[in-house]
Image: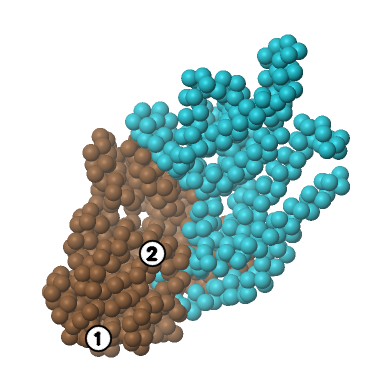
Chain colours: A brown, B cyan
Amino acid sequence: MKTKMSKTLIRLISTCAITIGLSGAAQAEILRVASQGDASSLDPHSHNESFTNYFLANVYEGLVARDVNFEITGQLAESWEQIDANTWHFKLRPNVTFHDGAAFAADDVVFSMTRALAETSNFKHVLASVDSFRAIDDLTVEIITKAPNPILLNDLLDLMILDKDWAEANGAQEPINLQAEEKSFSATNANGTGPYQIVSRAQGERTTMAVNEAYWGEIGNVTEVDFTPINNAATLVSALLSGEVDVVMPLPLQDIARVESAEGAKVVSSAEARTMYIGMDQWRDQIIESPVEGNPFLDLRVRQAFAHAIDAQAIIDRVMQGQATLVSQYVMDKVNGFNPDLKQLEYNIETAKSLLAEAGYPDGFELTMDCSTDRYVNDGQICQAVVSLLARVNIKVNLIAQSKAQFFPKVVAPEFGTSFFLLSWTPSTMDSLNVFQNVLGTRDLEGGTGAWNISGCSVPEADAIVAKAATTMDPEAREAMLQHAMQLMVDDVCLIPLHAQQLVWGTGANIEAVQHPTSEFPLELFNVN
Amino acid sequence: MQFLIARLFQAAIVMLCVAFIGFLVFQYIGDPVLALVGQETTVAERDALRESLGLNDPIIVQYFRYVANAIQGDFGISYSFNREVSEMIADRLPATIELVLLSGVLSLLLAVPAGIYTGIKRKGGIAQTIMALSVIGVSVPSFLLGILLILVYSVWLNWLPSFGRGDVASVLGFETSLFTLDGLRHALMPAAVLCLFQLGVILRLIRAEMLEVLRTDYIRFAWARGLPARHVYLGHALKNTLVPVVTAIGLQLSSLFAFSIITERVFQWPGMGSLLLHAIGQSDIPLLAAYLIFVGLIFTISNLLVDAIYVLIDPRIRHGAR
């Protein structure tokens, strides 16, 4: 009852704040954004897909977020403290309201966490380490983890907070349940605390947002956002060049020169956390779709030979038009666990040939490669380059270049139906634990690790170190462990790292855009000059 | 009346077959579950979702379940839009219809006079030019033409918008962009691209038919009777070219729906075509199935209309004479 009273009071106050805010509002600056895809839903718990998450991060907020320098800072949580190894107290930001004016309080956080754990939620993993949570008072939330979790804050980045009353009033207590064939109110409506609120939305057509005048934090000068998905790359670039949109993301690499030379448009790019790898089957006794007998990749020398034969720098220069960075390991340098001492195996055909000869394949062998053509930047061309590079060491590769709709069902669990492939990963937490758990760790599908370890590589020593690191609270000790584990995986050539791709956008000359390695687009940090 | 019922019955069978072929094809378009969940989703969760969506059932079971629901007007929920499929189609249909209508009308207005003219003055310079242009219209792929138009009129000249549908106005309960200036500006280029192929085909067909008819005896008699040229060309000749032309137009109009897929993609026109491409990319089976059935319906209806128009223009069919 008391909560209700104070909520009403805060609502009243915030209404006044809105009125004051409006009277002082600056001139309207509309930012027109176009992207190749659209958010798949407005429900922040229904589809864990990076574009949808980052789109919604402009509307909804989490307890913590990344600031302009990519550091984790408080968002709806003002501060936090660790009471003991497993207990965390989050002090919530006071006087925050949702877009409909309702006050934000601890019960909204508890509700949202419960919702994120619902059967139909796609975000259960962000709370996988959490044992229990409760509201201590109106502005304090307690989270107790099952075991010490040094990256609880990273995990919480993707947990968005909804208004409990709003969700309950609209029957959106849980994310959409497809099999029940219910329409979900929250898939097409939003009510967050974020800097922008949805004004209109036609999925796949257009979404307009207006600045949240009652927002607690700082916002750039963008007051309205007009978002359009444009699927066709050529149309996307034309829309920028004709001045019809201000930001296009991503900008196709082949159009960089065109945008750079155009008046009134520019290219912004920065390092992205997405890392590309070549994977080799290390779990079958007989590789598939190949005439070779047995599995050559079980021999470390063959894996090393492949790494020496693939000229990653040439791929960056030719295929990626320079818009990628060489990586020596399975994460890029801004991710926790990056080991600065590691070097990429140098490109050397002679070394590759002699390693192959030592392993018993002096005349090379033939195999099949699986590759998507519409998932990563220039993925099809990367694979073609790999095919011709390997031909120089007498490895004959039959390339199956296919759309992602064919590629992923073929290569993922439980079949893992490929013996040689291109794959990529972005650790959403920006911590290599995420990569170890999903991509590098020994496969244990029931235990929930290695679901994307399509190579089926296994380094038990690294697994043990990672398991220890997962509960080590001392950041330095933990970092050292992760780096050690990373080195073990690289020494074993679990995957061949190629490059970290660049995040490339085209914008109007008058736009100040902010890019993060995760490819999020925090519009409140944008400015129109 | 009996004729109509028979045709409607045929239409229903056509749609059932289309849906069945659709379901056979859906087995190869990918796994919708992978499009629905994030990278951190566990294998067990993926399996549970697949099971609950009924995707593990045999195709034939999935098909009959779908048909049983569809007969009751329930086309299911789109996996990727989380909305009712019938609602999605109702939302996107007006955009495609207005594009198809606009380009259909444009191509008829241009093709009929041009076809007659080139049929009569087939050696003239203008006629030769028109014929040359019509070859371009038939042979240049529409995505290329669309991109060229965007380059010229949006990027270089900055006259026309390159994407989207612009402002819409509500007319007779439908949202349409044909009644606002901004909407028309947006519709012009996609309609022109869509129209050009039809234009070439219909023009060439009318010309060929005219040439054929103008050689016949009754036209010579008409000239001999001293009838004015207008009567001979329009009253006698054109009328007799119409049966094959109307058939072609009917089929063309339905294929405009098919061609609009690419045009809509290029101009980001929010119609049925973009919806289909999205559904394919996401392996959105309920949406795909409904689209196929719907296009099947359009083809059968337009063929029905063509048959009805035959009766109007050709008295021999009306009177059952052969």
Q: Disc 2: which chain?
A: A
- Where residue B136 appears, as percent x and y from the top left, is 46, 34
Question: Does the rendering let one see residue A327?
Answer: no
Pick whichever of labels 2 and 1 is earlier in the sequence: 1
- Where residue B14 appears, as percent x and y from the top left, is 71, 56
Q: From what the image shows, is residue A502 above or below residue A359?
A: above
Tell me: A146 left or right of B184.
Answer: left
Q: Indicate the quadrant where residue A337 lies.
A: bottom left
Estimate the spatial distance between the alpha carbons at disc 2 and disc 1, rounded to whole Å.
26 Å
Q: From what the image shows, is residue B151 above or below residue A502?
A: above
Measuring 36% from the left and 80% from the top, which residue is drawn there? A291
Q: Secondary structure at mark 1?
A: loop
Q: Between residue A42 and residue A524, name the one nearer to us.
A: A42
Q: Indicate the quadrant where residue A382 lies.
A: bottom left
Residue identifier under label 1: A299
Amino acid beneath label 2: Ala
Measuring 47% from the left and 68% from the top, which residue is drawn there? B34
Amino acid beneath label 1: Asp
Measuring 57% from the left and 36% from the top, which residue is drawn there? B201
- Where residue B288 appears, as percent x and y from the top left, is 58, 58
Residue A401: image tag: 2
Look at the image and tell me in which quarter the C terminus of chain B lies. Answer: top right
